[in-house]
Image (cartoon, grey):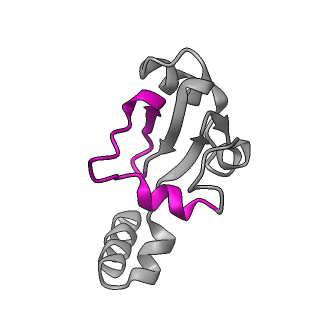
């Protein structure tokens, strides 16, 4: 019964205080950017290359070079966005994740 009370208390506190929520809840993590796997992110998130490859294959990619972004979601799922899936005329739901992931987020590699 103790773990349930702890979980409920953390839930209540994280709903009230953003700084607690930031430490308790997962945030989406960029695993692939512009066809390049971020191995440090894989290690940090304890995600295997096998899991990432499976998610990319499920999305239809046959090579990592076909993947614009792959994101480990807060739910534990991996979202894969192939290069041909971008429509710049719409609201970009990836903007906050990509911009928060580092200085090279705005431009593709040459």
In percent of the image, x 58 and y 59: which residue is there? 101
Specify start and end residues of the magenta stretch as a single range: 74-102
Q: Quadrant of the N terminus?
A: bottom left
Counting labels gives: 0
| Res 35 quadrant in image | top right
Look at the image and say whether residue 96 sits in the magenta stretch: yes
In percent of the image, x 39 and y 81: which residue is there? 18
Side (left or right) of 67 relative to 25: right
Side (left or right) of 24 relative to 14: right
Q: Is residue 26 at least partly visible in the picture?
A: no
Q: Quadrant of the C terminus?
A: top right
Q: Front-most of 64 and 107?
A: 107
Side (left or right) of 3 relative to 52: left
Q: Is residue 53 above or below residue 4?
A: above
Name the outermost residue toward the top.
Answer: 62
Residue 86's spot in the image, x, y percent? Answer: 38, 37
Q: Is residue 72 at least partly visible in the picture?
A: yes
Q: Is residue 46 above or below residue 93?
A: above
Q: Front-most of 13 and 8?
A: 13
Residue 42's spot in the image, x, y percent? Answer: 66, 43
Look at the image and say whether residue 79 sits in the magenta stretch: yes
Residue 97's spot in the image, x, y percent? Answer: 47, 57
In percent of the image, x 44 and y 64: which residue is there? 25
Residue 57's spot in the image, x, y percent? Answer: 50, 18
In percent of the image, x 44 and y 17: which residue is there? 60
Q: Is residue 2 above or below residue 85?
A: below
Side (left or right) of 12 relative to 84: left
């Amino acid at each position: 019964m103790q773990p349930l009370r702890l979980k409920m208390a953390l839930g209540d506190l994280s709903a009230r205080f953003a700084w607690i929520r930031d430490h308790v809840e997962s945030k989406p993590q960029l695993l692939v950017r512009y066809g390049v796997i971020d191995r440090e992110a894989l290690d940090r998130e304890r995600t295997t290359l096998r899991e990432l490859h499976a998610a990319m294959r499920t999305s239809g990619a046959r090579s990592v070079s076909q993947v614009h972004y792959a994101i480990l979601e807060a739910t534990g799922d991996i979202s894969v966005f192939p290069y041909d899936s971008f429509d710049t005329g719409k609201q970009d739901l990836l903007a906050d994740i990509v911009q928060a992931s580092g200085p090279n987020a705005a431009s593709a590699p040459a």
